[in-house]
Image: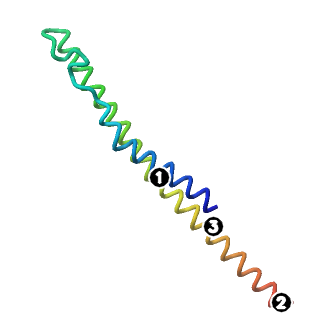
């Protein structure tokens, strides 16, 4: 169970990295033609704004999932401890009864 919890923690760390790195993927507005005049420039600026908003949203989702995975890893560890304690208690009672 500890190995499973460790792997879940690794997944959470990867998502946390994505949370920090995804916003860096926004290219300059010029890549969308935002520096053009008139309608093409307006469309380019809008596309750039939308692209940046989408990446921010995905980064936020990654952060939220990283937190949920961290909680899950801790729950796996806690359940593993609980099972081990229960097994020890049963074994102790069983041996005491012999």
* Residue closer to the observer: 31 or 38: 31
Cα distance in 3D space between marks 2 and 1 = 43 Å
Q: Residue furthest left?
A: 37
Q: Position of residue 93 (x, y in %)?
A: 77, 86
- Residue visible at 28% across and 25% down? 50
Question: Residue 33: which quarter of the image?
Answer: top left
Q: Residues within 10 Å of mark 2 (few under 14, many from 20)?
A: few
SS of the residue under disc 1: helix
Q: Is residue 69 above or below residue 80?
A: above
- Residue 30 pos. (x, y %): 20, 19
Q: Which mark is residue 68?
A: 1
Identify the image quadrant of the N terminus: bottom right
Q: Which residue is mark 3?
A: 80
Q: Mark 3 or mark 1, which is nearer the start of the sequence? A: 1
SS class, disc 2? helix
Instruction: Name the residue tied to disc 2.
Output: 97
Residue 98 against residue 72 in the figure, above or below: below
């Amino acid at each position: 169970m500890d190995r499973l919890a460790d792997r879940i923690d690794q997944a959470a760390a990867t998502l946390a990295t994505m949370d920090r790195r995804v916003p860096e993927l926004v290219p300059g507005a010029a890549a969308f033609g935002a520096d053009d005049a008139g309608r093409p420039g307006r469309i380019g600026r809008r596309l750039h704004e939308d692209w940046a908003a989408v990446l921010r949203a995905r980064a936020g989702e990654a952060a939220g999932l990283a937190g949920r995975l961290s909680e899950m890893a801790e729950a796996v560890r806690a359940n593993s401890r609980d099972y081990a304690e229960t097994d020890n208690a049963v074994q102790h009672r069983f041996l005491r009864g012999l």
